């Protein structure tokens, strides 16, 4: 599949964040979606946010009191993934389950910026934190999304494993950091992982055959913030 780069991604990857081209673009977005007025380039700051796995992210602020700052997310996914992700985000936003959606344009969207820290595995292992997370998750699982209701988790596992094999992946070395189980294997093979998926599918069908809930990879450990 041939990947194409959007105009806004090209702009942000080929110019300095202090360049006139980028400052003019973020002011244009602020005017279009957040009713910015009388904002000069000297009053705007663009800061890259690190940690995005599939997008470029930037925090846009001004030295003025009035204009709303925002997070600019520049997509690097295929269009079908961007569409689904934007629908997800809009529904989360509408229900108060995520940052506000300020607007979207070709190749990017504007979001509410929420100062936060990413949770670590150690933080989530805290029983008090775990209970709070567990109390919130049912609100996400109960959402009715306008997507096909066929189960995809097993399919996604197999697709990712096939992609791992296609890229030359072989035995994976296990480095246990958060458990003290001494009998874990030193490595796991692609064949073993495939059997694990088969076993999980059989187990899931026996227990959850008539249960269908919504989930999303943004509910994984690395995406939870506080």
Image (cartoon, rainbow, N blue to C red):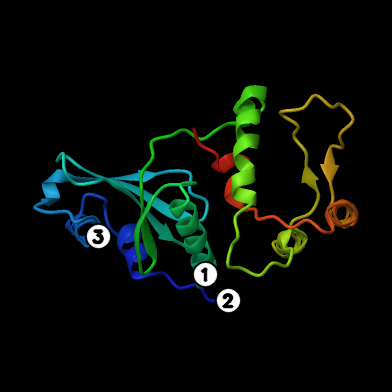
Determine whether 6 is above or below 30 in the image: below
* Place of residue 43 in the rendered image (x, y in percent of width and height, measured from the top left): 14, 44
Find numbered disc 2 in the image and state the secondary structure of the residue it sits on.
Answer: loop
From the top left corner, tell me how far across and down residue 222 is, in percent.
Answer: 58, 41
Specify the label residue 1 is tagged with: 2
Helix, strand, or loop for circle 1?
A: loop
Q: Distance between the residues labelled 3 and 2?
A: 31 Å
State the residue in front, 107 or 214.
214
Give the image location of residue 120, x and y in percent.
58, 31
Q: In this view, does 82 lie above or below 169?
A: below
**Which label's residue is closer to the chain start, 3 or 2?**
2
- Please give the residue where the numbered disc 3 appears in the rendered image: 29
Looking at the image, residue 15 sits to the left or right of residue 146; the answer is left
Nearer the N terminus, badge 1 or badge 2? Answer: 2
Q: Is residue 154 left or right of residue 6?
A: right
Choose top left, top right, bottom left or bottom right for residue 36: bottom left
**N-terminal label among 1 and 3:** 3
Q: Which mark is residue 78?
A: 1
Q: Which residue is drawn at 38% across and 40% down?
A: 114
Residue at 75% x, 61% y: name it.
165
Q: How far apart are marks 1 and 2 (CA)?
A: 10 Å
Q: Residue at x 34, y 60 (%)?
A: 103
Q: Say whether residue 168 is visible.
A: no
């Amino acid at each position: 599949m041939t990947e194409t780069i959007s105009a806004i991604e090209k702009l942000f990857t080929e110019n300095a964040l202090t360049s006139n081209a980028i400052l003019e673009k973020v002011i244009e977005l602020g005017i279009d979606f957040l009713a910015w007025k009388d904002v000069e380039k000297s009053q705007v700051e663009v800061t890259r946010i690190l940690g995005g796995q599939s997008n470029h992210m930037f925090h846009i602020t001004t030295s003025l009191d009035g204009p709303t700052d925002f997070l600019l997310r520049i997509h690097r996914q295929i269009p079908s993934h961007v569409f689904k992700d934007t629908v997800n985000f809009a529904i989360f936003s509408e229900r108060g389950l995520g940052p506000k959606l300020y607007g979207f344009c070709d190749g990017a969207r504007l979001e509410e910026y929420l100062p936060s820290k990413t949770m670590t595995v150690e933080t989530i292992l805290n029983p008090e934190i775990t209970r709070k997370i567990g109390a919130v998750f049912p609100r996400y699982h109960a959402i009715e999304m306008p997507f096909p209701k066929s189960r995809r988790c097993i399919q996604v596992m197999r697709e990712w494993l096939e992609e791992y094999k296609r890229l030359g992946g072989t035995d994976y070395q296990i480095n246990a950091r958060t458990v003290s189980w001494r009998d874990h294997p030193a490595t796991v093979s692609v064949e073993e992982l495939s059997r694990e998926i088969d076993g999980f599918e059989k187990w899931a069908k026996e227990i959850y055959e008539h249960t269908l809930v919504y989930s999303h990879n943004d509910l994984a450990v690395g995406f939870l913030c506080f």
